[in-house]
Amino acid sequence: MILHSYPSSPYTRKVHIAIQLLGFSDRVTVRNADVSDPADQLRRDNPLGKVPALLLGNGTSVYDSPVILEYLDHLAGGGRIIPREPEERLAVLTLQALCDGALDACLLIYAESYYRTPEQRVARWVDRHAGKVERALAALEATTPALSGMPNVGQIALACLLGYRDFRFDKTWRDTHPRLHAWHDAFAAAVPAFAASAPFDL
Ligand SMILES: N[C@@H](CCC(=O)N[C@@H](CS)C(=O)NCC(=O)O)C(=O)O
């Protein structure tokens, strides 16, 4: 399998963590895609031109990160990082959706500062997305998931969300969300793949 990846992408980090947790590192070749290059192989394998995308041995490709994690769980026999039991499964997938949605908002806020000059930036747009992140973190602080055994996709997404806050934003979330702070540090200690996939800019 070939994983179209990028080292600063939090969604790609989710996939790297799952690959390591499930023992698939030897079966996946990682390549860094150039999301800006129309000729990059990424756009052939994912018309959206987004990482992560996983090209399978049979030539089909799988994206986006929740779908790739679902595929990896299936490949590992199922029920490893996505619970089989419907109620638990729904809760875990909803946790993943909340964290991915907060990440989407973080990326939009970052893009506003990356692509636009200070004069072009729209405070109302940034505030709207900052509100999503704020509400998501407040909800997560109130219902921090228990951590024991194999992490599930919701917990993986939560770790990547908090890691992305550390990477692209200030670290004030740690002071304002003490339970999430403790949870993040416990996850980092329990899951070596988290530190191994720490984001960086190329
Ligand atoms: N919902 C997608 C989001 C993927 C995504 O937004 N990836 C970003 C990198 S962090 C990307 O490839 N952006 C390039 C672009 O949109 O052109 C997922 O979970 O995989």
Image (cartoon, rainbow, N blue to C red):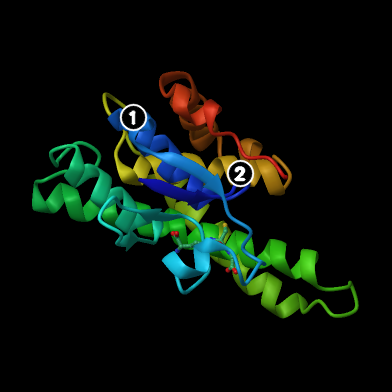
What residue do we see at 52% from left, 25% from top?
185
Residue with the most extreme top position = 189
Q: The N terminus is located in which quarter?
A: top left
Residue 21: which disc?
A: 1
Q: Amino acid at mark 2?
A: Pro
The residue identified by callout 2 is: 7
Residue 37 falls left or right of residue 50: right
Which of 128 and 7 lies nearest the eye of the viewer? 7
Residue 155 in the image: x percent, y percent? 37, 40
Q: Residues within 10 Å of mark 2 (few under 14, many from 20)?
A: some
Q: The C terminus is located in which quarter?
A: top right
Mark closest to the chain's N terminus, 1 or 2: 2
How far apart in space, not on screen, are marks 1 and 2 (Cα)? 18 Å
Q: Residues within 10 Å of mark 1 (few under 14, many from 20)?
A: some
Residue 82 in the image: x percent, y percent? 22, 45
Indicate whether 22 appears above or below 29.
above
Residue 101: which disc?
A: none
* Quarter of the rendering containing residue 120: bottom right
What residue do we see at 38% from left, 53% from top?
54
Which of 157 and 5 lies nearest the eye of the viewer? 5
Residue 103 in the image: x percent, y percent? 53, 57
Residue 159 falls left or right of residue 133: left
What residue do we see at 15% from left, 40% from top?
79
Residue with the most extreme left position = 85
Which of 84 and 174 lies nearest the eye of the viewer? 84
Which of 71 and 98 lies nearest the eye of the viewer? 71
